[in-house]
Image (cartoon, helix red, strand yellow):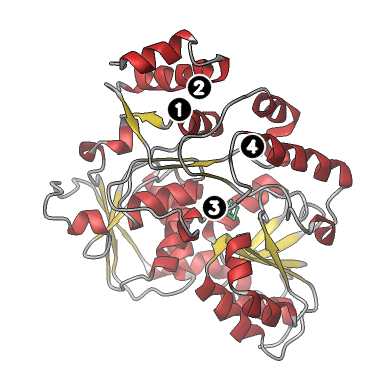
Amino acid sequence: MYLTKEEEKTLRGDDGETLRKMIEILVALGDIYGADALIPIKSAQVSGVSYKTIGDAGLEWISDLKGAVKVPTVLNPAGMDMNNWERLGIDPKFAAKQIEIIQAFGRLGIEPKCTCTPYYLNGFDVMYKDHLAWGESSAISFSNSVLGARTNREGGPSALAAALVGKTPDYGYHKAENRTPNLEIRVGFETGGSDYGALGYIAGKLAGNKIPLFKMNSVPEKDEMKMLGAAMAASGAVALYHIDGVTPEIKDKEFVYEKPAESIVIDRKEIEAVYETSGDPSIISDIVTIGCPHCSKAELQQLADLLEGKTVVKEFWIFTSRETAEQNADLVKLIEKSGAKVVCDTCMVVSPAANSFKRMMVNSGKAYAYVPSMCGLAATYGTAERCVKEATGVV
Ligand code: F3S
């Protein structure tokens, strides 16, 4: 891989041990994947933040690093609400470790913004064809597909290395030729709301790490594409998808691609099967969660409307970023009037808070895929309306 004189100096250790280690990670990745150079990135999002997922080894690794990030950088959700961790019964020992992790990132100049929807943050704008180094799978999918930016699926160390160096190796999804769809998925019926999470759950299993091109009857909203991509990244390894006539790259006349040789059809029955347990009155969830990925303002508004005049009869947790919650304090207040809890900085999967429950109802294909394996709970998939009904007992 070609390195500039400055990059060679950094690799020799002239800019300190941390930067030497960081550029070494980037060069190693570039060599493995055939990059010819490092390219500047506009922003980074670092995963591997929850103490539940990185443990003491991860904390130690981050704590040893020195220096400051060179591009705007935010974090993936942590293992708890950083301002209100007692509320979900987090163990104080866990909280102390989680605080240490956030402080260690802070010493590297990373603001404590812990969210999988960094594209909603003020000052963290993503433009078409921007190069990024993001680490959370749903955020990667959204930025690549819905925003038409370019990022590989970064691991925690490689996203942090890119943030500290300000560059990433130019391979994979950074190259236009690697963004060509290679699987057509036809969805010949109307879809809306949580159908997109269910569709993503099915499509991800079928697509693996391919790049799907959807032909759909309906035109999804951005929040619906967020749910579609998050689910495909969890049940499969989809980091980029296109929707005919909808997503920006496929509409770009300069984007050259051929019709995928492989084509599959997803039918309504497959989607209905994902909802199956939510229609069974004998299957009761003891907790309900929404906000995977983190809720947008529109999703908070929907929940405030659905919960109006109702009281929850079981734990109902709604996850969003701290910034979205603060900007929509009126909606948070309306939601919490019902007894539901709006929780920031974390989520049902990366927090240990839900581990003591038995069955969780979710409206997210990603949570549906991960809750059993990451939290040890059974999961039921339902619409937002069905989730509110489960939490309140009121239709
Ligand atoms: Fe975000 Fe957690 Fe879901 S990180 S995408 S809310 S699993």
Asked if marks 2 and 1 touch (Cβ < 8 Å), the reply is yes
- Label ID, residue 105: 4
Q: Toward which corner of the image does residue 104 lie, by quadrant? A: top right
The Cα atoms of the two marked residues, 2 and 1, are separated by 7 Å
Considering the image in quadrants, where does the C terminus appear?
bottom right
**Going 44% across and 52% down the picture, which residue do you hit?**
232
Considering the image in quadrants, where does the N terminus appear?
top left
**Going 81% across and 59% down the picture, which residue do you hit?**
88
Hey, what amino acid is under mark 3?
Answer: Cys
Asked if marks 3 and 1 touch (Cβ < 8 Å), the reply is no
- Label ID, residue 22: 2
Q: Secondary structure beneath disc 3?
A: loop
Hey, what amino acid is under mark 1?
Answer: Val
Asked if marks 1 and 4 touch (Cβ < 8 Å), the reply is no
Q: Residue furthest right?
A: 92
The Cα atoms of the two marked residues, 4 and 3, are separated by 16 Å
Could you tell which of marks 3 and 1 lies nearer the N-terminus? 3
Q: With 384 as the anchor, is 127 left or right in this view? A: left
Hey, what amino acid is under mark 2?
Answer: Met
Q: Is residue 157 above or below residue 12?
A: below
Q: Is residue 316 above or below residue 305?
A: above
The Cα atoms of the two marked residues, 2 and 3, are separated by 23 Å
- Label ID, residue 116: 3
Q: Secondary structure beneath disc 4?
A: helix
Q: Position of residue 18 (x, y in %)?
A: 56, 19
187 vs 162, nearest the viewer:
162
